[in-house]
Amino acid sequence: MSKKHLVFFWLIVLCNTVYSQNTISGKITSQGQISASDIHIHIGQKISSSDASGNYHVNNLPDGNTKIYISHIGYQSIDTVIDLKNNLKIDFKLKLNTTKLHEVVIQQKNSNKKSVAEQQLKLETIEKYSNKSLGDALKEIPGVSTLKTGNTVVKPIINGLYGSRVPVLNNGVRLEDQQWGTEHAPNFDVNAASKITVIKGASGLQYSGDAIGGLVIIEPLNAKKDTLFGKTVLNLDSNGKGGSLSSGIHKGNDLDWSWNALGTFKYLGDKQGADYVLSNTGNREANFSGDIKYTAEKYNATAFYSYYKSEIGILSASHTGNVNDLYQSINNKQPSIVNEFTYNIKNPKQDVEHQIAKFNFDYYLNESASVTFQYAFQFNKRLEYDVRRGDYKNTAALDLDLKTHSINIDYKKNGHDWNLKSGLSANTQNNYANPATGIRPLIPNYDKIDFGAYVISGYNFSDSFSVDGGLRYDFSKIDATKYYQKSRWEERGYNETFPEFIAGDYGTQWLTKPDFTFHNISASVGFHKKLERNWDIFSNVSFASRNPNPSEFFSDGLHHSTGVIELGDLNLDKEQSTKLSLTIQKKYNGFSFEVNPYFNHIQDYIFLKPVGFETTIRGAFPVWEYQQTNVRLWGMDIQTHWNITNHWQHSFSLAYVNGKDSSNDEPLIDMPPLNLNNKIRFSKKEWHQLILELNSEIVSKQNRYPDNNFYTNIIKNNEFESVLVDISTPPPAYHLLHFYTEMKFNTFKNATTTIAFSVQNIFNFSYRDYLNRQRFFADEIGRSFQIQLKFNY
């Protein structure tokens, strides 16, 4: 053989070695009835489709890692990588895309490729809090704490921020439940959730542009296949001598009709502190939620309704008659009112009703694109009762009706390595303050219009590196009608700054019609990098704006359920936040940890500050005023999980936030102190899936706080005496131990019963929480024994 022929021969051999021509073939089947010839197949650089019987054949494929991507409208895409070395025959089965049918959170092809590491509470954890509030359950997530008014009104705090900075979305609907005040808890039954996702920061632009603190996204329980099942949860609690009953039934279907229904009832009496009864702290709840859904191959339609009703007693001792009572409560360290236990709920109290009616329509344009339309109506009625006498004894001091209409249209497109989502939203809102209360309303009548548009996108440069970003525009306009005392109007300087708002003269009062318009831009950009040896890095920068809410603008008078005078400010400007967040994750064989440092600069931060007291015909009351300043918050959340053995696990979490009023060079009020949680768990599947948990909760003293103390005169020995009212100094640190255990039993065919027992505050420790607005008047609740029975059928 000549040299030319020999070289040519070896070149052919080498090419065949490097570029071995392999073939992948097989058959594609599906759960439903589809045209098999329409199935899209992408293998390596080759694009093909199956024949009428579902058979496919792709040849001329080189050796090495080869991507296989198979998709069809209405079905879950198959996306995998194989190490190709020779001819292969692989069969695939397509599953219905149930994630599209009840989408709540935007999911990429691989959800871990977002630039923000989302944290979730799964059903197992949520069920432990069946008898508690949403805020209580969210404390399981590092970096989430709570702002409380008593032990039933609980608001979530994310990285030091709360209120309207932390929107709550229930089944894709942003809750509009007069959530502005610190004593307004989210109107939601935790039993209606199957998964709760927390996004720290303003990266969820498809939902909101004002989520400076973060988002809480609640996904309801839905059946994902052709099945019928139910669940009933019974809770009994020694502290309050009551409990709750929740029962749901769920009918699923791949196609055609499916539905869900859930009802919850709670009934508890007065809570018990370590040393005394917390009088008038009982609560009641009656809740229902349900939906009906029709699913076809190219679309689905859903109708959803929820009803939430609660009656909440406000600690009697917290309703001070004047600032003298406040001084005595703070210094005596004992509630001024302690009665025998009762189930009765008297004034002061809250009576709240919230309803949501929603319709969704999802249409799938092709295997990778869809359009969603959503309309929702919300009605919230809030009644707050004061201790009143005479004809107004049983009349609410605050009576508000809030109606909200919202429309959302979203477009979603998924490519092989990228995704895009854009949408429009519009909302109209009306608040009606009932004048029959006989008291000038704390929040006036107003109409509000919101419009938003957004676009977000993500791109996977490789299996280990991806970026995402988004931009959102929001327009908002609010028009109010409010009576102001002329003395208050002039005291605030409004006669010079807002003379155009005056619409009428009624003797000692001005009739005013304030109106404000806002244009806001929000943005987010970040990346996710997956390193070798199971290291992950998430980084995100977000910019968000939040308008002053109605409470911050218009509050003007005595807030009867809290016994303080609150003053809004018409001069308030919008908040603007720039947040940098970094998350580092590492997984070993039996150990994993996550570290999340962050920095947040907020310009024109709005906060409620105690500024002294004011004398009324009922006495002298503390005055809290909404003010603005520039702040910076930085902190860190840490969590670890260690599988010590097959039966023993340990988890740890730490959360620290440092808030500073940078304009006045002083600490920021109402910042969560350092807290640490340790949990050790023993589990044994062979013993009826036994679980034993011991949880240690340590909350340190908040040593960084502003000095807002003030002096007042009290009557002592028939003479006025000037005394210092210490409303600033935080309570001491505390350490609590909690215990939990459960076992599961097969009771009858396809049914299980779970029996759980827990003890909260095992040693009945007496303590007060800095972030409880009632810490001036009483301790937190003491030891609590709880039994839970869960029936799955």
Image (cartoon, helix red, strand yellow):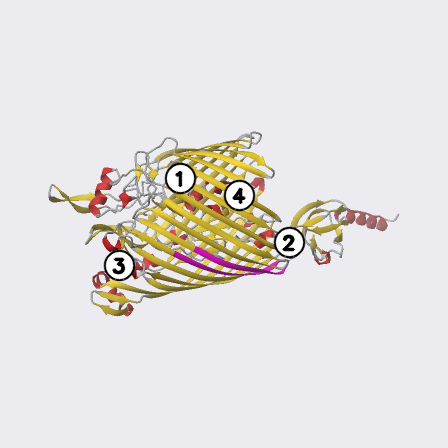
Q: What is the three-letter code of the residue carrying label 3?
A: Gly
Q: What is the three-letter code of the residue carrying label 4?
A: Lys
Residues under labels 4 and 2: Cα distance? 29 Å
In the shown orientation, is residue 324 left or right of residue 73?
A: left
Say whether residue 217 is visible. yes
Q: Quadrant of residue 379?
A: bottom left
Judge whether residue 442 is colored magenta.
no
| Lower sequence index among marks 4 and 2 | 2
| Lower sequence index among marks 1 and 4 | 4
Which residue in the structure is indicated by mark 3? 438
Q: Quadrant of residue 653?
A: top left
| Lower sequence index among marks 1 and 3 | 1
Marks 1 and 3: CB-CB under 8 Å? Answer: no
In the shown orientation, is residue 784 left or right of residue 64?
A: left
Residues under labels 3 and 2: Cα distance? 59 Å
| Lower sequence index among marks 3 and 2 | 2
Q: Which span is picked out in magenta?
A: 355-380
Number of the label disc, if any, that sits on residue 242: 1
User: Is disc 2 placed on a helix, strand or loop?
Assistant: loop
Q: Residue 154: give x, y in percent of width and height.
A: 38, 46
Q: Residues within 10 Å of mark 4 (few under 14, many from 20)?
A: some
Residues under labels 1 and 3: Cα distance? 36 Å
Number of the label disc, if any, that sits on residue 231: 4
Residues under labels 2 and 1: Cα distance? 46 Å
Residue nearest the observer in this picture, 321 or 775: 321
Which residue in the structure is indicated by mark 2? 75
Say whether residue 549 is visible. no
